[in-house]
Image (tube, helix red, strand yellow):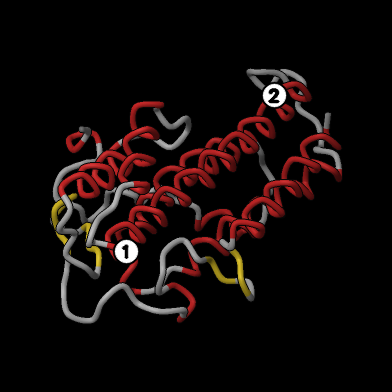
């Protein structure tokens, strides 16, 4: 199963690269990341939470609700209702094209996080199989698992480092969703590199109200 986990990680890398999340080792979770282009220079959207800021005033109510729903739910498994709402808002005719771009980028980030979380869960299950649920069979991890852990950490930090100062709202959400799974792995393993000490869950820090409070 170790080789399977490695394959899953590699497939995830190919998956996000295919969707355009990684370009020149930088994430494109939202337009404007990596200097591609910014949403807007003159407006700010605060309606998901006081510190959840989009550089555009989303004027279409349906797009606004879809964005809020995506930011409010857990990204371990996206609810079908939220997916339908997002797809409907993305396919409609609207004058708020930039709002649709914002929604599309949030949606793609959610899908990528969902995919990566599944891989991290598989990796943790592989570790549990090796050492036991309570650690009764503690042993050194195989090179395959250690390599998978290194790749997972590198991809996670690449994601976070790619966000610009204007994408705080999305970085915090990704950090909350994927960071939780990363911490689960960190708690199951000893001897990881010191860089793993930097893995935290800061997704709701600095926000006025938790994501749970903002569920649609």
Q: Is residue 175 above or below residue 78?
A: below
Disc 1 to disc 2, C-alpha distance:
34 Å
Q: Which residue is mark 1?
A: 168
Give x and y (percent) for residue 94: 24, 56
- The residue depicted at 76 percent of the width and 49 percent of the height is 10
Q: Is residue 208 above or below residue 80?
A: below
Q: Is residue 5 above or below residue 128?
A: below
> Residue lying furthest front in this view?
93
Left or right: where does residue 81 sit relative to residue 18? Answer: left
10 Å crowding of disc 1: few (<14), some (14-19), many (20+): some
Give x and y (percent) for residue 174: 43, 51
- Mark 1 vs mark 2, foreground winner is 1
Earlier in the chain: of badge 1 and badge 2, it is 2
Give x and y (percent) for residue 213: 17, 35
Count of picture labels: 2
Q: Quadrant of the C terminus?
A: top left
Question: Where, by quadrant of the figure, is residue 89 drawn?
Answer: top left
Judged from the image, the secondary structure of the residue bearing numbered disc 2 is: helix
Residue closer to the observer: 147 or 18: 18
Left or right: where does residue 106 sit relative to residue 14? Answer: left
Q: Which residue is mark 2?
A: 128
Residue closer to the observer: 165 or 104: 104
Left or right: where does residue 128 sit relative to residue 92? Answer: right
Judged from the image, the secondary structure of the residue bearing numbered disc 1 is: helix
- The residue depicted at 53 percent of the width and 66 percent of the height is 27
- The residue depicted at 41 percent of the width and 26 percent of the height is 80
10 Å crowding of disc 2: few (<14), some (14-19), many (20+): some
Give x and y (percent) for residue 152: 66, 50
Left or right: where does residue 127 sit relative to residue 52? Answer: right
């Amino acid at each position: 199963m170790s080789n399977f986990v490695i394959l899953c990680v590699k497939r995830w890398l190919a998956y996000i690269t295919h969707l355009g999340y990684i370009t020149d080792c930088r994430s494109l979770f939202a337009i404007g990341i990596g200097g591609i282009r910014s949403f807007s220079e003159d407006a700010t959207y605060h309606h998901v939470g006081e510190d959840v800021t989009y550089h555009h005033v989303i004027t279409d109510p349906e797009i606004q609700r879809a964005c809020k729903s995506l930011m409010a739910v857990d990204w371990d498994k996206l609810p079908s209702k939220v997916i339908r709402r997002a797809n409907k808002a993305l396919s409609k005719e609207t004058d708020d094209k930039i709002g649709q771009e914002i929604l599309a980028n949030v949606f793609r980030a959610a899908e990528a996080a969902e995919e990566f979380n599944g891989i991290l869960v598989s990796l943790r299950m592989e570790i549990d199989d090796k050492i036991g649920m309570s650690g009764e069979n503690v042993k050194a991890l195989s090179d395959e698992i250690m390599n998978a852990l290194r790749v997972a950490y590198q991809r996670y930090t690449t994601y976070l480092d790619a966000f610009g100062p204007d994408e705080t709202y999305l970085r915090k959400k990704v950090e909350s969703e994927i960071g939780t799974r990363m911490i689960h792995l960190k708690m199951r393993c000893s001897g990881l590199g010191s860089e793993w000490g930097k893995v935290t869950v800061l997704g709701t820090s600095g926000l006025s109200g938790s994501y749970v409070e903002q569920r649609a």
